[in-house]
Image (tube, rainbow, N blue to C red):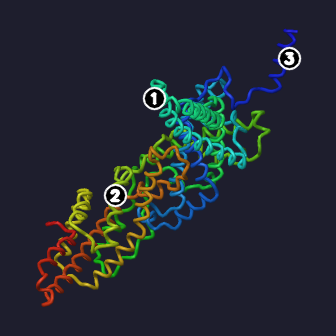
Amino acid sequence: MGGGETVNGAWLSAIWPLSRKIVSDEKEAIGILASEIVGVMSKIVNLWHSLSDRGIASLKEWITNSVGVKMLVSDDYYYLMELALDEILSSFQCLARYVARLGKRCKDPVYHRYESFVRNPAKNYVQWCGWEYAWKKMDRKVKKMERFVAAMSQLFQELEVLEDRQRTLKRMKANPKTHKGKLAEFEKKFNWHQQEVKNLKDISPWNRSFDYIVRLLARSLFTILERIILVFGNIHLPISQQQGDSVIIESKHALRRSPSLPVNTSSYVHPSETKGPVSSESEAEKNKNKNKNKNKNKNIKKQLQQSRHIGTFQGVSKRYIDSQSCRIRIYSKLPEKGCFLKPARLTLGDAALALHYANVIELIEKIVSSPHLIDHHTRDDLYSKLPTTIRTDLRAKLKWYAKRKHDPSIAAEWSVAMTQILGWLAPLAHNMIRWHEERNFEKEHTTSEASVLLVQTLYFANKAKTEAAIVELLVGLNYVCRINREAQIREARQPEFSRSRSFHRAQLRNHDLCYEI
């Protein structure tokens, strides 16, 4: 009977295997690593939402209508979408590499091989066919990951409370006579709270196995990759732009110069066409990269063609074969891309000035909206944030304007011009600040949707053009403030203001943005 019971027990366990959700004796629980894993889940959720129909439609609409991007980055829609794709693939690869490292701790050897896919997706994709979720099932998995993130957030809060109560309980037990009536009641509350923490660990990734978590994350990433291929696979670039991502295309949508602005002022924002587009690569480098990418695409295409003859691949849906060219383009980007985008030369991202200039533009916007509130501190704060290049250009232009008679009608036109410039420049600055805030370390465990990509910020903006626009704003702001100051001084010279003339002059000096030059 003993042997029969053993056989029956083994037979029953074969019919009802242990759930992947429950950690068996052989499998290691995630434990404290759950805090790191929910951060990855949060990023996966955000990436999936950004690839939704609504998210992609919003991105395309923004790129199409943004004057600032056309002025400072490029007016080529496909080039801009390629920049968005690069950032999305960069985020994807960072997540995939983390899951690959996590897969090495799994008991099932199949997850150990996930790293081979991350290193060369074109060569190793066939063995992972079918791992992606259906769209609707992926939505359910996204909601599950959101619940995991919420459960972990609550768990950490309860762990802090439990720790405090544990210290209190120890003090009460050390002096039982003092807390004789309250000790039993408090101990019940502590035990109840301990059980609540245990329940939270069960519904969070804390007590899940590495195999279960890696399976969930890996399949989610395969689904996201399919979504990327579907959304971006058919967006083809001209050959010259496919090979030269660092080319900054001259904008064809230059803002109309205000008739009140002199010609040499407009040239700071819109450089002469004789300079041509700003390129970060020489012709020899472009040809070299072009040949390199062609050979690489041929190898990937050959690998995918060979995979069509594999028996396991013949039963897969036809869309895997029909989208072969799309996969070639996406896969060719994955192996060589790092976790960080490399901006083109002569851009704010390359100079590490994107966030700094965004803060400067935001401060100028506040001053323009209320020029009468400018004080010494605001002026000094703004001037201290300006780099040497902008200060030099600003001094040169202010010298030129100092020789001209100030006209109140021109000041009004300057106000309109500043409003127009800020209309297309300020949104890029706001998005740059928001992009950094959304990726703040303290917020990485939240599932709030990351709604901004770098292509919508100042990161890829041409440095010279952005500085010219900032100088234009400062010159206009200085002109308007001087006109207002002179008008108030004339009013102060009237008899009724003679007694308070010194007060007015002291107050008006605060409105002057210029330093002695």
Please name the residue that numbered disc 2 is placed on.
357
- Assign the N terminus to one quadrant of the image: top right
Drawn side of residue 157 relative to residue 429, left or right: right
Label 2 crowd (10 A; few <14 / some 14-19 / many >=20): many
At x 59%, y 55%, the residue is 236
Tag 2's secondary structure? helix
> How many callouts does the rendering have?
3
Q: Nearer the viewer, mark 2 or mark 3?
A: 3
Q: CA distance from mark 2 to mark 3?
A: 72 Å
At x 13%, y 81%, the residue is 500
Please name the residue that numbered disc 3 is placed on.
8
> Residue 154, image x and y in percent?
56, 41
- Viewer-side residue, 6 vs 77: 6
Q: Nearer the viewer, mark 1 or mark 3?
A: 1
Callout 2 amino acid: Tyr
Please name the residue that numbered disc 1 is placed on.
178
Query: Looking at the image, which residue sits at the far bottom?
Result: 495
